[in-house]
Structures are given as C-alpha cells and as structure tokens.
Image (spheres, helix red, strand yellow):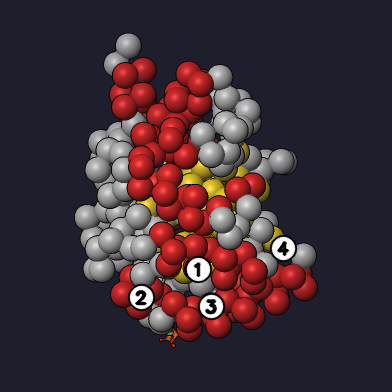
C-alpha cells in the first residue's frame, strides 16, 4: 500500500511566512527563487487574501510578477473567494486553493463565515477556475483538533472533504492545523475521509506543534497517501490558530522518505541551504532537526 513516489507540496513561502511578525517582499521572493532550484515540483507561493487579515501575504501580485519561474514548477496560491481568484488569475498563478474547515468556530475566525457559507463562496471560484482551465486544491483545517472546539469527529472531516471534492477540487489537503494529532487518530481520520474521497485525491498537511507530524505521516503513508505538504525549516503557523507552529519541516520529511526508499526528486542539500538562508534573514531558529544536524557537521 505504501506509495513508491511522494509528491511534496512546499508550504514555506505561504504557511511558513504568513505567521512571521514581519517579512519583506524581497525575502519572500528570494525564498521562492531558492526553493525553485531544489527540485520541488510545487510551491505554494502566496495568498490572495485580505491584507487586513494577513498583512504578511500582501502584494501577492507583485510577488508573482517578480519570482523567477522555473519550468516544471507549479506556483500556487490561496484564494478564499472570487475576488482573490480574479487577482490570482491576473497575476498568472498556476493553481489556486480554497480553504475550509471541519470546525465552525475556526471557519468563523479564519475566513469570517460558517462552513456552509464558505462552500457557497467557493462555488464561484470553482466555476471561474473551470472556465480558466485552472486546477483547484481544497484544504480542510482542524482535521485532528480545533483551537476553539477541541476534538473534531472524523465524520465531520469526511463531510468537509467530500463537499470540496464533489465541488471539483482535484485534491483535498487534510490539515492538522494545531498539530495535536497522534498516529492512531491520524489513521482513523484518514480512513474516515478515504471512505468518501479516493486516496489519490488526498494530501496530508500536518503541523508539528507537538512534535507528532513525522510519526503521523509515517503511519498514514501505509494507507497509500502520496502527497505531503511540508515547510522548509519548519517555518510557520496560522494567524488564526494561536500557538500553532509550522508544518513538518520539509528537510525532515525528505530524510524519512530517503530512509524508507521512497523517491521525491528534491535535493536535500539545496533545500537545507534555502532554509538556513531564510532563517538567517528572519533571525529565527531553524525548525528542521535534519538541517541543524547537517549544518553542525
Ligand atoms: P471579510 O471581511 O468577511 O470579507 O473577510 P468581505 O468580502 O466582507 O470584504 C471585506 C474587505 O476585505 C473589503 O475591503 C474587501 O475588498 C477585502 P475594504 O472594502 O474593507 O477595504 N477583501 C479582499 N482583499 C484582498 N483579497 C481578497 C479579499 N476578499 C475581500 N481575496 C476574507 C473574508 C476571506 C477575505 C478574510 O477573512 C481573509 O482574508 N481571511 C484570510 C485568512 C487567512 O489567510 N488565513 C491563513 C490561511 S488558512 C491556513 O493557514 C490553514 C491551512 O494552512 C490549512 C491548515 O493548516 O489547516 C490552509
Ligand atoms: Mg497550515
């Protein structure tokens, strides 16, 4: 059941930088350009959201105009509504993502509407993307716990994932937004979702707040999931999930995949350099254990 090849979706420039106190446009662009040289095939580069809500992601249009795009790399962005989609399309984004939640309270805090209202807002995005021939990814947040509601039932996660899939999202990324999951619960949640959405259309997006993301991903790989979101140097968190830290560090994921003999196409040394450079620019510690070990050798 374990897949032989893993597709990594790199989150550092979006999920990673959206939670930094301040980050310059130049540093965001430099990170994306460095990541583009590592063999990563998909880089989530920015969000077309309200700059009042997430100022760190402002000027996404300028970012897309200035990055050095590499052939074969898909540069994607978050678009919560039609306004965001139209701006993303004008900026030349390759792929967009809508983001919903399995928790009502998180949905309200993050995108200012209920789960049901969010699905209504996504419909015109799906229609416009279909007309433009663009793929749409869907996120479900709070799949293993909510900062406001606590435990979330796997059936609720499955409902949200199924709704996004039926709406036309080619892939559903399952977010452990606050990183509280443990392997047995992660597998149970994934099994509940997989009974409604086929495994090839599912991705894992696990934050590492409690240090469980690698264990959770290793367990879920056994069910055949082949797409994993990760963030260089473990950068990140969500502004509307207080205390949450970044996604699993991409460097640590790659070390695991190498150990399991699964291919991924990423140059670990180049990635470690990209992570070290952005950490230095931000003046923050590197959240990748593998990077720290390699850099100290
Ligand atoms: P709202 O206030 O309900 O929106 O916010 P509105 O439609 O009433 O518009 C209000 C103002 O926002 C207007 O401007 C609009 O023009 C503007 P004003 O007239 O006041 O000057 N606006 C926009 N501006 C730019 N781009 C847009 C846009 N839409 C409206 N697309 C909204 C609703 C969704 C916009 C807001 O709540 C928002 O931007 N939220 C973003 C939250 C966010 O980015 N969170 C982090 C990403 S999600 C995440 O990290 C989780 C994930 O990683 C998975 C996981 O880990 O679980 C994906
Ligand atoms: Mg996230």
| Residue at x 50%, y 68% (from the top left corner) | 159
The residue sitting at 48% across, 18% down in the picture is 259
| Residue 17 x/y as whole percent | 38, 52
Q: Which tag, 2 or 1, sits closer to the chain's start? A: 2
Q: Which residue is mark 2?
A: 104
* Camera-nearest residue between 95 and 167: 167
The first of marks 1 and 4 along the sequence is 4
Viewed as shown, does residue 190 lie left or right of 123?
A: left
Residue 36 position in % (x across, y down): 58, 38
Q: Can you give x and y, in whole percent of width and height, for residue 101 in the image?
A: 42, 67
Asked if one can make out residue 6 in the rendered structure from this viewpoint, the answer is yes
Depth check, front residue: 158 or 94: 158
Q: Nearer the viewer, mark 1 or mark 4?
A: 1
Distance Cα–Cα, label 4 vs label 2 = 28 Å
In this view, the residue in front, 172 or 223, is 223
Q: Is residue 206 above or below residue 287?
A: below
Tag 4 residue? 134
Say above or below: 203 vs 279. below
Q: Position of residue 180 (x, y in %)?
A: 28, 49
Residue that badge 1 annotates: 159
Q: Earlier in the sequence, mark 3 or mark 4?
A: 3
Q: Alpha-carbon distance for marks 3 and 1?
A: 12 Å
Q: CA distance from mark 2 to mark 1?
A: 13 Å
- Pair 2/1: label in front: 1
Inter-mark Cα distance, 3 to 4: 18 Å
Q: Is residue 224 left or right of residue 103?
A: right
Please identify the quarter of the rendering in which residue 264 is found.
Answer: top right
């Amino acid at each position: 059941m374990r897949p032989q090849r893993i597709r990594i979706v790199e989150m550092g420039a979006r999920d990673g930088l959206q939670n930094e106190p301040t980050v310059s446009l130049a540093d965001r662009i430099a990170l994306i350009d460095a990541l583009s040289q590592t063999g990563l095939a998909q880089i989530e580069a920015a969000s077309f959201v309200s700059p009042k809500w997430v100022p760190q992601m402002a000027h996404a249009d300028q970012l897309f105009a200035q990055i050095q795009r590499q052939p074969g790399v898909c540069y994607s962005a978050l678009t919560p509504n039609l306004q965001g989609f139209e701006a993303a399309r004008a900026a030349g984004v390759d792929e967009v993502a809508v983001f919903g939640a399995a928790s009502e309270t998180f949905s309200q805090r993050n995108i200012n509407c209920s789960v049901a209202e969010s699905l209504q807002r996504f419909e015109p995005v799906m229609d416009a993307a279909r007309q433009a021939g663009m793929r749409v990814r869907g996120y479900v947040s709070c799949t293993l716990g909510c900062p406001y509601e606590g435990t979330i039932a796997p059936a609720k996660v499955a409902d949200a994932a199924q709704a996004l899939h039926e709406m036309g999202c080619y892939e559903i990324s399952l977010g452990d937004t606050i990183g509280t999951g443990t392997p047995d619960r992660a597998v149970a949640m994934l099994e509940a979702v997989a009974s409604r959405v086929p495994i090839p259309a599912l991705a894992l997006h696990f934050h590492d707040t409690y240090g469980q993301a690698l264990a959770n991903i290793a367990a879920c790989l056994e069910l055949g999931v082949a797409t994993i979101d990760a963030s260089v140097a473990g950068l990140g968190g969500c502004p509307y999930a207080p205390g949450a830290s970044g996604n699993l560090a991409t460097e640590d994921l790659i070390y695991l995949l190498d150990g399991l003999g699964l291919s991924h196409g990423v140059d670990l040394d180049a990635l470690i350099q990209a992570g070290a450079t952005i950490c230095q620019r931000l003046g923050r510690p590197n959240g990748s254990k593998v990077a720290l070990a390699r850099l100290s050798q």
